[in-house]
Structures are given as structure tokens and as C-alpha cells.
Amino acid sequence: MIIDITQEIMGCKVYPGDPAPKAEKLYDMDRGDLYNLTVFSMCAHNGTHVDAPAHFIKGGRTIDRMPPDTFVGRCFVWRHTGDLSAADAQNILAQAKGCPRLLIAGDMTVTARAARVFAAAGIKLIGNESQSVGPVDAPMEVHKILLEKEIVLLEGIVLTDVAQGEYCLCCLPLNMQGAEGSPCRAILIKE
């Protein structure tokens, strides 16, 4: 079974202050053109996207320099509501039993204390449903704690109907040279 956990890009959620995606048909068969051709613009952090270390770390790795296996492999989905404490983070890691990628469903915020627990665990990726893994009013600290350890952030996923448990994740970003983030198509595979 394949579960798409990606927001639709043109109607996606946008972090406060970021520009929303726009699309324009340059050529349109409905207008008599021979083919359809669309041009679009968007922020690298609209909708479902990944953050590379360069997003908050000067000299950090960019999307094109991250190994592809960061974005593909075993993951563990957990549900939580509210602020995620250090004890919550330790509990998730214990339940995940070594899964190097964690996806946390629900209306929750990773606190700096929880981020430090994840950073010490050496995981590859953390995903969440909001447009920012940290508090919306002050996301920098949590981003820096995780990105300094090269833990990629998968933000804006949709886990509404996804049960807790282990899956295979694929969330490959676009290969954009020098980019600090990228939209991606995120899917979970459950056998």
C-alpha cells in the first residue's frame, strides 16, 4: 500500500510571510495553442518540503549535497498533541526501535529540549504536519539544533489518516544546486 502524505502544491499551506505558489499557462490547448505549457513560481518552503542544513546553518549542506538515502528508507510515525518534551522525544525514540526517520503527526511543536534529544540520537530526518518544526513565533532555535547535526526536516506533511507504526518513507527533493530547501513528493509504503 502506498500512502501519499503530500499537500497539493497550488493550494498548499504557506508559512506566514512566505510567498504563495503561482502558476500561469503560457500555452493552452483550450485557447487554440498546439500544446499546454505552464510556468510557476514558489518558495522552496511552501507546502510539503524538506529543509537542508543550509536553511539555518552558514556553510551547511544544501539540498543537492545531501545523500539521497537521507530521504528514503525506514521511518516511524508517532502521534502527539501539544509541545513535545524531552521525555516525549525519548519515548518516541524507544518506540521507533532504531528507525532513522521520525514523522510526528498531530498539532504539535518540537521544543528545543526535544530537539536536543533527537540531535543526540543521530537520526537522519524528522517530519511534522505544520509548516515549521519549531514554534511558529520562534522557529530558529529548534531548526539550528537539528540542522547543525544534519538532521533533515520534512515539513508540511499530511498524516491525518496514517496509523502509528513503521513504514518506508520516500520524500526525495528536487535536485536544485545551492538550495537550502525544496518541495518534495512524500509517500509512505506499508507492506
Image: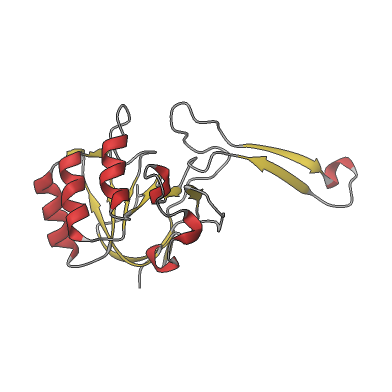
Image: 4 above or below 67: above
Residue 15's place in the image compared with 172, above or below, is above
Residue 71 screen position, x and y as percent: 41, 62
Colour mode of the rendering: secondary structure
Quadrant of the image occupied by residue 122: bottom left
Location of the C terminus (image quadrant): bottom left
Query: What residue appears at the point 30 percent right and 50 percent down from the top-left corner?
Result: 148
Q: Which residue reaches farthest bottom?
A: 191
For the residue pair 40 and 144, the one nearer the viewer reads as 144
Query: Which quadrant is home to the N terminus?
Result: bottom left
Residue 135, quarter of picture: top left
Side (left or right) of 88 relative to 57 = left
Which residue is pictured at 50% across the width and 31% down the height? 18
Taking the image as shown, residue 81 lies to the left or right of residue 187, namely left
Closer to us: 26 or 106: 26
Q: How many marks?
A: 0
In the picture as drawn, the residue positioned furthest to the front comes out as 59
Which residue in the rendered view is the most extreme toward the left? Answer: 87
Q: Which residue is drawn at 89% across and 52% down?
A: 34
Q: Residue 112 at what x, y percent from top left?
A: 19, 40
Taking the image as shown, residue 152 lies to the left or right of residue 40, namely left
Residue 173: % across, % down: 50, 56
Q: In which quarter of the image is residue 101?
A: bottom left
**Residue 68, image x, y percentages:** 44, 66
Name which residue lies at 20% across and 67% down. 98
